[in-house]
């Protein structure tokens, strides 16, 4: 039987902190436990109040997970990260920033981590060390982020889900959201930035290139837990969409 703990959480409390409180409460028998819960909690932690940052937090764990949680330093239970994926120019960093501010949890951008670690721009890494080197680094940094305890909103690079087993790993470490932006809008945005983007720098017809690459990448993007087809929305509407899925 799974154990379900329910806690009323206060404005902006971090999920990790709330989870710790639940277990303190659980040990002290303050939380009423509970019944078998078979249905809707896909993720272990879920806010139940989409518009306000408070509400009921429900945690579902198996009996043995609970025991291991107490016997270890509590890191056994992995964090629930939120990963934003999608093609270049789809607005991943923009929305990751917004979500991070909304939930009051940290934001990370994989490309930023790579440039900091290498002290080179993404273009310089592609041009001097090659794409294979970049992809390996991207994978390593993703793994480092995934293994941290504190929940984060993570803006991925456009290619992150399509290399190594990154998509599978992200899905098991949290919630993946695909910003599925129409090709013509991506094109408009990327035409303005072609020179800055290593994958597009030497391409004559970027429309054809984007269409072909999207065709290959869609099989990865489509695996996302949540697909956002319209990003002409407010942060509140964005959050509502996530929580209604
Ligand atoms: C890439 C997307 C870029 C960056 C690199 C490769 C891709 O990230 O990681 O240029 O393969 O689509 P953004 O999508 O954040 O621009």
Image (cartoon, rainbow, N blue to C red):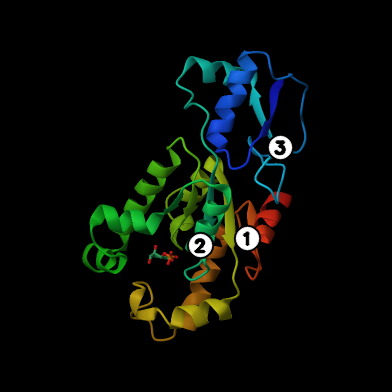
Q: Nearer the viewer, residue 15 or 59?
A: 15
- Which residue is at a point 58% across and 42% down the rendered structure image? 12
x and y percent of residue 115 in the render?
Answer: 29, 58
Quadrant in the picture for residue 179:
bottom right
x and y percent of residue 187 in the render?
Answer: 51, 80
What secondary structure is found at the residue carrying circle 1?
helix
Q: Is residue 245 visible?
A: no
Q: Nearer the viewer, residue 60 or 31?
A: 31
- Residue position for label 3: 41
x and y percent of residue 66 in the render?
Answer: 59, 19
Task: Give the numbered dot on residue 235.
Answer: 1
x and y percent of residue 3 in the render?
Answer: 69, 22
Q: Nearer the viewer, residue 8 or 127?
A: 8
What secondary structure is found at the residue carrying circle 2?
helix
- Which residue is at a point 26% across and 63% down the rendered structure image? 125
Label 1 CB less than 8 angstroms from ligand 1? no
- Residue position for label 2: 92
Residue 133 falls left or right of residue 79: left
Per the model, the C-alpha gap separating discs 3 and 1 is 23 Å
Q: Nearer the viewer, residue 54 or 143?
A: 54
Within 10 Å of disc 2 (Cα), the crowding (few <14, some 14-19, many 20+) is: many
- Which residue is at a point 56% across and 59% down the rendered structure image? 221
Q: Earlier in the sequence, mark 2 or mark 3?
A: 3
Q: Is residue 203 visible?
A: yes
Ligand number 1: quarter of image = bottom left
Per the model, the C-alpha gap separating discs 2 and 3 is 26 Å
Label 2 CB less than 8 angstroms from ligand 1? yes
Quarter of the image with the N terminus is: top right
Within 10 Å of disc 1 (Cα), the crowding (few <14, some 14-19, many 20+) is: some
Within 10 Å of disc 3 (Cα), the crowding (few <14, some 14-19, many 20+) is: few
């Amino acid at each position: 039987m799974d154990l379900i703990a329910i806690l009323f959480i206060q404005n902006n409390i971090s999920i990790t902190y709330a989870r710790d409180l639940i277990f303190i409460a659980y040990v002290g028998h303050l939380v009423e436990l509970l019944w078998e819960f078979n249905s809707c909690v896909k993720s272990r932690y879920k806010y139940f109040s989409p518009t306000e940052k408070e509400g009921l937090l429900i945690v579902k764990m198996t009996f043995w997970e609970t025991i291991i949680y107490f016997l270890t330093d509590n890191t056994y239970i992995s964090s629930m990260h939120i990963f934003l994926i999608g093609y270049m120019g789809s607005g991943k960093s923009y929305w990751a920033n917004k979500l991070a501010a909304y939930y009051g949890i940290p934001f990370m951008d994989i490309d930023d981590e790579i440039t900091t670690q290498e002290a080179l721009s993404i273009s310089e890494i592609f041009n001097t060390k090659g794409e294979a080197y970049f992809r390996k680094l991207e994978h390593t940094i993703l793994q480092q982020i995934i293994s941290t305890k504190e929940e984060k909103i993570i803006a991925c690079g456009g290619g992150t889900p399509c290399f190594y087993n990154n998509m599978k790993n992200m899905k098991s470490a949290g919630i993946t959201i695909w910003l599925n932006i129409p090709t013509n809008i991506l094109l408009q945005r990327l035409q303005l930035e072609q020179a800055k983007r290593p994958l597009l720098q030497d391409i004559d017809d970027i429309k054809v290139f984007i269409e072909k690459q999207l065709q290959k990448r869609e099989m990865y993007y489509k695996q996302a837990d949540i697909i956002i087809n319209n990003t002409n929305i407010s942060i509140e509407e964005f959050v509502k969409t996530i929580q209604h899925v």
